Image (cartoon, grey):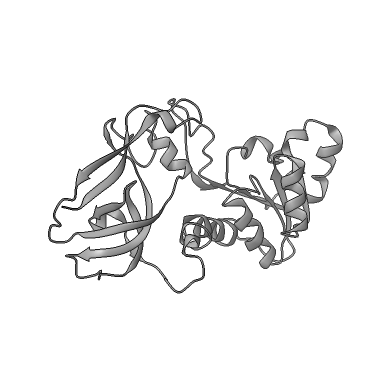
Amino acid sequence: MTINRYWRLNSRPEAQDVSGSLSLESEPMPELADGEVLVKAAYLSMDAGTRMWMTEREDSYQPPLELGTKMVGLVLGHVTASRHDGFAEGDLVRGFGQWAEYSILQPELAGLVRVDDTIGDIKQHFGVLGFNGWTALWGIKETAGVKAGENVLVSAAAGSTGVLACQVAKILGANVYGLAGGPEKCRWLEDELGITKAIDYKMTISPPNWQKLKAVSTPISTMSAGRYSMPFCPIWRSTAGSRFAVCSPNMRATDAGAGRSSSTRY
């Protein structure tokens, strides 16, 4: 009999510590039903939204997980058995499954898709070829409508979505500015990604640092992609024609209190 190991959510995590809230459990592998596929996980993803489902918050796009159930999240792996016409054994797939060695999924409910297995690093299907890449591309190109020569300010610029938003804006020919926390991140954004200027939001209380934003003031497209988004965006410096693309600012993803996530153009 094949045994499946999985992570079970036993309690609500405290702050950033999730280790005490999960336990590794085992169960016999259930039989596939018609329309289902069996996926053996190669990688599991812990995203901000996933972390929020572990709380009692009810304002997410998915209700909170019940205690005593399998932890869920994005899964990247291979189909090992299929009773669904759209998927065959050996397919590399990505979708919402369980934090387990094996997930039994209904593709339509899990958002399961086949992905390219010929790329050098399949983990990129969780990053630049996944939700982060889609968010950055759509937010910069479609929502904000960035054009060559414009100024773009990206908050959380060193984060998983922010680094991609910076690169998309740069490819489009924009002057890219980034907000990040700490001098090392700012140096990396300037030296490695080659953005126009990185600004340390932890030091923005000093007037000299606010002066760095003068060059961004007319006009500006802002891609807010993380926790420190709108409070540090120079809205008061913006002019007519400025755009603000707000992408799921998980400001309190670890809190049980209500918050708001959005994908909005202002």
Q: Position of residue 223 (x, y in %)?
A: 61, 50
Question: How many callouts does the rendering have?
Answer: 0
Question: What residue is drawn where x is 85% and y is 41%?
Answer: 211
Name which quarter of the figure residue 67 lies in.
Answer: top left
Q: Nearer the viewer, residue 173 or 228?
A: 228
Residue at the far right: name it: 208
Is 118 situated above or below 36? below
Question: What residue is drawn where x is 47% and y is 59%?
Answer: 130
Residue at the far bottom: name it: 118
154 sits to left or right of 196: left
Question: What residue is drawn where x is 51% and y is 47%?
Answer: 264
237 sits to left or right of 120: right
27 sits to left or right of 116: left
Q: Nearer the viewer, residue 119 or 260?
A: 119
Q: Position of residue 108 (x, y in %)?
A: 25, 58
Q: Position of residue 228 (x, y in %)?
A: 62, 37
Residue 66 visible to the viewer: yes
Question: What residue is drawn where x is 24% and y is 55%?
Answer: 105
Residue 217 visible to the viewer: no
Q: Position of residue 162 (x, y in %)?
A: 61, 51
Residue at the far front: name it: 1
Is 27 situated above or below 9? below
190 sits to left or right of 121: right
Name which quarter of the figure residue 54 lies in.
Answer: top left
